[in-house]
Amino acid sequence: MTITAEQSFLAETARKQGGFGGSAGEIVTDDVCAWFGGRLVLEGVSLTMERNRVTALIGPSGCGKSTYLRILNRMHETVAGAQLAGTVALNGTDVYDPTQRAVDVRRQIGMVFQRPNPFPAMTIYQNVLSGLRFNQIKFSNPDDIVEEALTKAGLWNEVRNRLKALGGDLSGGQQQRLCIARGLALRPAVLLMDEPCSALDPTSTRRIEQTIGEISHEVTVVIVTHNMQQAQRVSDSCAFFLAGENEPGRVVEFGATDFMFNSPSDPRTNDYVNGQFG
Amino acid sequence: MTTTATRSVPEASEPTPPDGPRKPPERKRIRPRDFKPSDTALVGITVLSAVCAVWIIFDQLTLLSGVFGFIVVTAVVFLVLYYVLNRQLFGRRVAADRATGALVTMGVMCMIAPLVLLVGYLFVKGLHLLSWHLLTSTQNKVLESCPAGQTCVQPGVFHAIVGTAEQVGFAVLIGVPLGILTAIFLNEIGGRFAQPVRVVVTAMSGLPAIVAGIFIYSIVVIHFGFSGFAGGLALAVLLLPTVTRGTEEVLKIVPNDLREASSALGAPQWRTVWSVVLPTARSGILTAVLLGIAVAIGETAPLLFTVFGSKVTNWNLFNGPQASLPLLIYTSVKSSQSSDVALGYTAALVLFLMVFTVFILARILGSPWLGRTVRSRSNQRMANAAARGVGGGPVN
């Protein structure tokens, strides 16, 4: 009985997920460019985010990291006057294919924002299940899904006795982990994180980093961060974005994190990761 | 150096027993800006001396008269006295602070006074007739004038309560969903038509009530005759802009983060609006709806030639003239019969109590604690439904 419920959930999720497949995914982008109101802000980004790896996007403010991240799950197009070029492929399927619906892509590629944003009118329990409800995915064992997602996000032990409390009643760090749990409950192939710790204290930051390490076994993580130590601690590979004056942002260098921090081939990368500028 | 704040010097902490938590010693607590009993006494003394001084000037020296003038002069004298006193006692800064505070408080009193007077007047004029009989009977078979020595049927307002409830209820039924949908269109969907629609809604909010009445009269009443339905339509026209503007303002303050979070979870836009935006704005929308009801329930002008008025209970909203409380008040109070005038005042009291009840109910419904129980219950329902769906035992 148990297995049936679990299997039917998986089958339903997989069906909803269309051609993407169930587990962690690989994102390959080719020559991605972005415009805001006719101004080129990002040019020629070709990166590969490998399956089950954590990729960090680093660089000074205004170099297009967040824009790039939002292009990956088609959130970029929700901004008025935003355009883009290039291809983004998740497990070989073009997410910008005319037959792809943006909502299906976003279900596959979850996102955690800079500021924790749990739904204030919902309880913790409902917040976790919100993604499934929004997508009308049938599920038969809500308690298990909630427990699993919260456990993965490292929040279960703290909230197990107050699941009926409102999401806004949690502390900032807990709210952010609730947002991660909310994303994980949909079993995405990729989880994008846009400076997830910039509004949090060091302890919560540490906790989230730990969470990232744990969930990378199941999802591919792409994280934008301004914190060099954080990039070094959590990521497997690293992309350094930089925008010159009146120039669009470009990727200066992309490689394994160790390599990027210890022996980068570009002097600008070396300067940035060692705090010489930015 | 003058100051009222007495600083407490921390006393030497008492020795704590080795076992058990240390109980902190009791300390003298202060709140620097607290209003102490001595300050209240100061205000009282100042008021008293202001009244006495003005009385001497007004009645004894200058032979002026008039309550209004007395109050105004007293207020001014009080402010001056209060400032001078505080300046002598506590210095300039405190005096300026308190005088300003007193001025603002007087402003608040000026605003509250009309309300209190109005409600008080209603109760004084209307309460003596308020009875169960009045609430349950109509004006049917009530004689124009009651000959002496005869027991006459006392009039009631039941028919008007029924009329008002039905008409306003109908107006809410039509106007509130339309208003909320319009607000959603304006704020969530937008596009080229948003601005024209917004202009129209703004223009509608300035529409004189009588014009709304004429409009409905010319398109409904002329063809189908007087009815509560026509009145409800006219009220809906008046309620729509209030609900729309109010709801739009509330939707504007729902953080955009939440819409983004919802989209990022793969929710279509209608889902985002239904499950995230509207629940977040719930209490604000409720306030907008209440304001709309308040507008609709007190309107008289559009009802004059849409529901027409009646002395008997007409339950049918769609056929024949209906009574309504504002109409009944309007016709009663301008009557030459003193019994009618008294009925009018009581009807006004009933109308006030109806509005008040609706407001209280809405506050309770909109309060966080009830909202929370309702939400967790729906949550429970969801879980129950899900459990029934499986039909299996506990899952490990």
Image (cartoon, coloured by chain):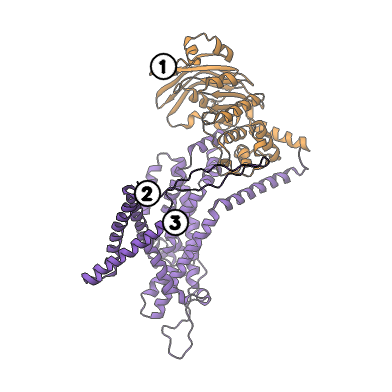
List x then y, in percent, for residue B110.
35, 60
The answer for which chain carries disc 3 is B
Task: Say which colour chain B has.
Answer: purple
In space, the residues marked 2 and 3 are separated at their CA atoms by 17 Å
Left or right: A209 in relation to B43: right
Residue carrying label 2 = B200
Label 3: few (<14), some or many (≥20) within 10 Å?
many
Is residue B321 in view?
Answer: no
Q: Do callouts 2 and 3 point to residues on the same chain?
A: yes
Q: Which residue is mark 1?
A: A244
The lab-note entry on whether marks 1 and 3 share a chain reads no
Give the class, few, some or many, for how many residues have Cα within 10 Å of label 2's Cα (few <14, many ≥20). Answer: few
Question: Which of the chains is orange?
Answer: A
Image position of B5 with respect to A59: above or below: below
Residue hosting label 3: B292
Q: Chain of mark 1?
A: A
Secondary structure of residue under mark 1: loop
| Residue A186 appears in view | yes
Query: Quick one: SS at disc 3?
Result: helix
Q: Nearer the viewer, residue B185 or A24?
A: A24
For mark 1, does the 10 Å Cα neighbourhood hold few (<14), some (14 to 19), or many (20 or more) residues?
few
